[in-house]
Image (cartoon, rainbow, N blue to C red):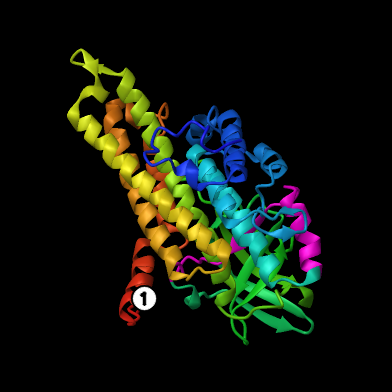
């Protein structure tokens, strides 16, 4: 496919496709087709019923979307940019579906891939890449969100075994997962543990009555005398650099995904404005509507340019970690504004699930919060600018 022949997205004012390779465009079209066929016809019902569709997991695996940026063990070995492009298309369907790929690949699989033993990798990664096993990542606790160093979950040695006690909260997929990566304090610092979820003492309970991420699963995890063999510990890391190395992978995916949600909301609003008549002419013919559409499109273009630039730096090995905070903070913040503005063009119809903007906006409240709040990323960037840490 010649990338100059591909029809531009409605929001694309700068021929963004000219910056992509034919392989990157082909991947985007494949994932976009999957979203169009499998997600968009069903997402309103899934969201309304608060259902995560487990039956699409094998379909995602067939497309190589699970752990797609990892090499070997059945993973696709795609680039950071390709991973971002796929995330944007999935989140154009719904944040919950992109979050599944992030929890599975950027968090649980990455933790085992980066820090696990060869035995742990061989046991879990091929099954997770194939969608035969689902993983979760237990870091956040009821009283330890932005400050994971204050976690209370503790793992003590008992002979050759480890015994874990504690609790985790807002853990994606935990009640449907076969394996959990649990982070816990130990006498030697914070360590990660590979925990089969059928281990005695492990209980995952879904958090219900959510206003956001309804087509997704988040859970409380209780760990009561969870006994594990010595081989369960991730051997190659101690301290918060372990989970943070995985969080940075997930944060990177968000700066693409949030713009995918924004683009989808814009497209709904644009199409509606061209069809909806008020005072005998389309809404699109009014100056105020055109200003809203232009402002939204400009931020979408800038957001994707930022995502692509950071992705290219990541692929080249030239990424400074604060740059991920630039992308996550900016793109989430702007995406929510875009989705809310798109809803105004839809009027009262915009509060229904017939249209995507308010669903996306609600979801993005969660995306904006997890993997580092606005405040945390602001302080990361403030520290970068001033050299003065202001977290405490």
> In this picture, which residue range is highlighted in magenta?
119-146
Q: Is residue 151 left or right of residue 67?
A: left
Q: Secondary structure at mark 1?
A: helix
Q: Residue at the far bottom: name it.
A: 188
Q: Position of residue 118 (x, y in %)?
A: 79, 70
Q: Is residue 329 left or right of residue 246?
A: left
- The residue nearer to you, when weighing 316 against 172, is 316
Residue topped by disc 1: 384
Residue 310 visible in the picture: yes
Quarter of the figure that contains the N terminus = top right
- The residue nearer to you, when weighing 8 against 196, is 8
Q: Is residue 323 left or right of residue 56?
A: left
Q: Is residue 70 left or right of residue 145?
A: right
- Is residue 116 in the magenta section? no
Q: Position of residue 302 (x, y in %)?
A: 36, 50
Residue at left offset 77%, top offset 67%: 120
Residue at left offset 35%, top offset 80%: 389
Indicate the quadrant where residue 292 lies: top left
- The residue nearer to you, when weighing 151 against 368, is 368
- The residue nearer to you, when weighing 12 against 372, is 12
Quarter of the figure that contains the C terminus = bottom left
Residue at left offset 36%, top offset 56%: 330
Q: Position of residue 127 (x, y in %)?
A: 77, 53
Tell me if mark 1 has few (under 14), some (14-19) or many (20+) residues whose alpha carbon lies within 10 angstroms of its own: few
Q: Position of residue 299 (x, y in %)?
A: 33, 46
Position of 79 relative to 379 (above/below): above
């Amino acid at each position: 496919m010649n990338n100059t022949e591909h029809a531009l997205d409605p929001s694309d004012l700068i021929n963004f496709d000219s910056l992509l390779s034919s392989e990157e465009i082909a991947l985007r079209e494949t994932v976009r087709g999957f979203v169009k066929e499998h997600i968009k016809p069903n997402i309103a019902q899934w969201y309304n019923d608060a259902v995560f569709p487990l039956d699409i997991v094998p379909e995602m695996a067939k497309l190589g979307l699970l752990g797609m940026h990892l090499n070997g063990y059945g993973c696709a070995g795609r680039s950071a940019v390709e991973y971002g492009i796929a995330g944007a298309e999935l989140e154009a369907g719904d944040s919950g579906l992109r979050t599944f790929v992030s929890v599975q690949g950027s968090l649980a699989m990455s933790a085992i891939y980066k820090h696990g033993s060869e035995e742990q990798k061989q046991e879990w990664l091929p099954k997770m890449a194939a969608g035969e096993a689902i993983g979760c990542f237990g870091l956040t606790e009821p009283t330890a969100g932005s400050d994971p160093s204050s976690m209370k979950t503790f793992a003590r040695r008992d002979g050759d075994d480890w015994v874990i006690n504690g609790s985790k909260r807002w853990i994606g997929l935990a009640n449907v997962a076969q394996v959990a990566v649990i982070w816990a304090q130990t006498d030697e610092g914070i360590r990660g543990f590979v925990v089969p979820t059928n281990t005695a003492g492990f209980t995952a309970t879904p958090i219900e009555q959510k206003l956001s991420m309804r087509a997704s699963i988040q859970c409380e995890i209780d760990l009561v005398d969870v006994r594990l063999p010595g081989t369960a510990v991730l051997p190659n890391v101690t301290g918060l650099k372990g989970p943070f190395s995985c969080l940075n992978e997930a944060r990177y995916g968000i700066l693409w995904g949030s713009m995918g949600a924004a683009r989808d909301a814009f497209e709904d609003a644009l199409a509606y404005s061209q069809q909806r008549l008020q005072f005998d002419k389309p809404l699109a013919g009014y100056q105020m509507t055109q200003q809203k559409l232009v402002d939204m499109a400009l931020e979408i273009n800038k957001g994707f340019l930022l995502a692509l630039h950071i992705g290219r730096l990541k692929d080249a090995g030239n990424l400074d970690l604060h740059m991920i905070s630039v992308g996550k903070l900016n793109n989430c913040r702007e995406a929510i504004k875009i989705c809310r503005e798109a809803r105004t063009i839809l009027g009262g119809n915009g509060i229904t699930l017939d249209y995507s903007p308010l669903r996306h906006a609600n979801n993005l409240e969660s995306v904006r919060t997890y993997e580092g709040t606005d405040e945390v990323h602001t302080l990361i960037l403030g520290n970068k600018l001033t050299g003065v840490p202001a977290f405490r």
